[in-house]
Image: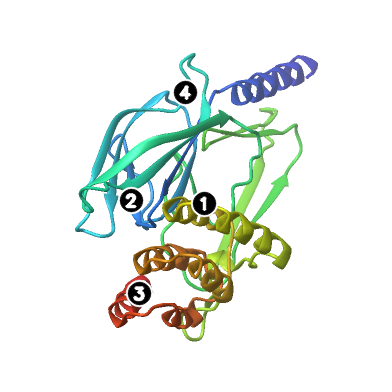
Amino acid sequence: MNRKNTLLVMLMISTLSFAQFVPIGHLNIFSEDGDRFTLILNGEVINDVPQTNLRVEDLNQPYYNAKIRFEDKTLLDVSKNNLMITDPDGIFMDVTYKIRRDKNNRTKMKMNYFSAIPVVPDFIPPSNVHVIHYGQPIAPPVRGGVSQTTTTTTQVGGTNVGVGVNIGGVNMGISINDGIGNGVVTQTTTTTTTNHSNNIDVHHDEPIRGCGGNSCMTPGNFNAALATIKNQSFEDTRLKTAKQVITANCLNVDQIIQIANTFSFEDNKLDFAKYAYDFCIEPRNYFKLNGIFSFSSNVDELSDYVQSRQ
């Protein structure tokens, strides 16, 4: 019996050690102009619902062939072969790529390297980032309450050792009994009810709060961010800074209006208003932004854009 227990412990240690030292990297892709996209890696569709800010975790290859397909069919696909997940020394990183529209051709898109940082264990991404664990199946759309799994294990005599390990999104389970004829009977019952994502009203099927149901920026943080935006000398830089601020934060309608009013050109106001929609906690009140425009054509364009996203 002691020899058997020793073998089991060694098996557990070796399995856990293998899981601990499997190198992995993470990939972040965001759209600077707020265009929703689907990512395809090595021919595999990663996100079934188009996103503007996507994070793919647990990538175990140094290079991937990537393709970006946009929800807006007027925008051309972007393909990038040998997209790097490692640094030049082959060390896996947490890399970020940026998608933007070509200045000379608004239907042509570009995806450029943006940054890379060392992989941080247990990193928690911002709430507005859609996270996919590579290698795990995409969960089908669900509606309703909360998913719950109940497992009951009954052991009839003997010795039983169980090991569960997750390696790069793959679950490994090991169950061993003493082989004397006594075994372990495991019964698993799964009852699934689900909530709408983004706080959906189950009675009316309408979004209650946008931006993942999170709260908007506090007045102090917002005022500091607004001052930073206003301090930019050029309007293009001001627009980029504003987008950078809200990419990592949620805003209410009044905060979005204040930022939009820092722009002199209506085209920039419209650009920002479209981009900010995904980060607004109260999308039902987005009609209030109509007041920032002098031209009715811009009001109509924003209204059409909002309706297309609902």
Along the polypeptide, which appears first: circle 3 or circle 1?
Answer: 1
Amino acid carrying label 4: it is Thr
Please state which amino acid type lies under the numbered disc 1: Gln
**Mark drawn on residue 86:** 4
Q: Which mark is residue 302?
A: 3
Q: Secondary structure at mark 1?
A: helix
Q: Secondary structure at mark 4?
A: loop
Q: For the residues marked 4 and 2, what is the alpha-carbon distance in whole angstroms?
A: 22 Å
Residue reaching furthest to the front = 233
Res 38 label: 2
Residue at 42%, 62% in the rendered image: 275
Q: Is residue 193 visible?
A: no
Indicate which disc, 4 or 3, sits on the residue closer to the N terminus. 4
**Residue matched to label 1:** 244
**Is 163 located above or below residue 22 in the figure?**
below
Q: Quadrant of residue 225?
A: bottom right
- Measured Cα–Cα span from mark 3 to mark 1: 21 Å
Residue type at mark 2 is Thr
Mark 3 residue element: helix
From the image, state whether disc 3 or disc 2 is nearer to you.
Answer: 3
Where the N terminus falls, by quadrant? top right
Give the foreground label among 4 and 3.
Answer: 3
Q: Residue at x 65, y 18 (%)?
A: 14
Q: Are marks 3 and 1 in contact (CB under 8 Å)?
A: no
Residue 128 rendering spot, x and y as whole percentages: 54, 57
Crowd tier of the residue under label 1, counting other residues whose Cα lies within 10 Å: few below 14, some 14–19, many 20 or above: few
Q: Residue furthest bottom?
A: 203
Q: In the rendering, at what x and y percent does residue 57 appear?
A: 51, 39
Question: How far, Cα to Cα, is label 3 from label 2?
Answer: 23 Å
Question: Can you say which quadrant of the picture contains the C terminus?
Answer: bottom left
Please tell me which residue lies in front, 10 or 61: 61
